Image (tube, rainbow, N blue to C red):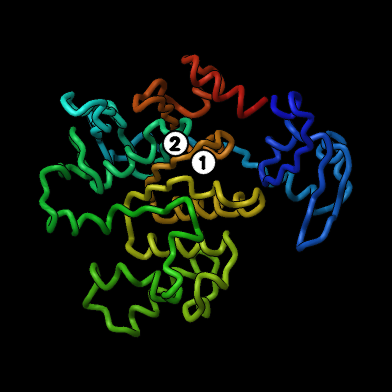
Amino acid sequence: RLQNELGLSILLISHDLGVVSRFADDIVVMHNGKKVEAGPTAQVLQSPKEAYTRHLIESEPRGKMPPLNDDAPLLLDASDIAVTFKERRRSLFSPAPLFHAVDRIDLNLRRGETLGIVGESGSGKSTLALALLRLIRSEGRIIMDGHDLHSLNQRQMRDWRRRLQVVFQDPFGSLNPRMTVGQIVAEGLAVHASNLSRQERDMKVAQILEEVDLPASAQTRYPHEFSGGQRQRIAIARALIMEPELLILDEPTSALDRSVQYQILELLKSLQKKHDLSYLFISHDLKVIRSICHRVMVMKDGKVVEHGETEAVFDQPQHGYTLKLMSAAFA
């Protein structure tokens, strides 16, 4: 709209080919600092001439998760979860109004299952994750493997933190730049496996780095020496070394370009199959959600507006907001 009103020229830099295809008249594809292909957007994306352009297009998240075994046991059962914040007072004598960031949400997750949580910014996705991790105050019940986490004190909860791990959105900001990769990955072992010798700790770090397709020699290097995708692998290794049962992934691929994003998604799928992990996958990218999640939960303004099997929700959305999200993602 602003372009039309003001006669603007726009240089749009993005790794999201869906956005580029909808808004750009022409496109330039770059690789290793060089221009590899250029031309009208529709022509380049529909009939790419260069191998790297084809590689980018083919790296779009695709496929769907195979059905979960019917006998997969329940791992997490959360009910009536609510998170409320006090807003700024409108006047000196009026009570502070309440903001319901998460409004009485129920969810469950079986072993080996991935539940996707989608919604626009501010819908309460990350706040819900923090509540389930007991990193912020919340109401309701959080039952994990038959135990009520809300009934545990801080010391008792520490023993459960090994089983609940998280990977954050920003692979650049979530790693301490002053620590080596080996120190970052092994940090949790100092709390949860303090009986290990240094040699045993280094061996576990080397093994977990190999699982995420990084060399053991990465232990002695620092985060700034790695690409964004490699840093996210380091973050996954840091979580995985604790041998968790539930991994919360908060927008883990949104900062990555499509080709690297595809690699990380495939890595997460293989790790889930190998270790029988359960994932709570938070994202605004519906193509990513469709490719990795068994079920999906749609949030808006702190509430769940739709929930079901991924393909059922994508093929026949029942709520107007879900339909709006689908239209924006797959237009």
156 horizontally vs 122: left or right? left
Q: Secondary structure at mark 1?
A: helix
Q: Nearer the viewer, mark 1 or mark 2?
A: 2
Q: Could you give the CA–CA distance between mark 1 and mark 2, rounded to whole angstroms? A: 8 Å
Q: Quadrant of residue 274?
A: bottom left
- 147 to 163, vertically: above or below: above
Residue 46 at x, y percent in the picture: 83, 36
Q: Earlier in the sequence, mark 1 or mark 2?
A: 2
Q: Which residue is mark 1?
A: 292
- 201 to 302, vertically: above or below: below
Residue 316 at x, y percent in the picture: 53, 17
Mark drawn on residue 116: 2
Q: Are marks 1 and 2 in contact (CB under 8 Å)?
A: yes
Name the residue rendered at 59%, 36% in the picture: 287
172 horizontally vs 142: left or right? right
Q: Secondary structure at mark 2?
A: strand
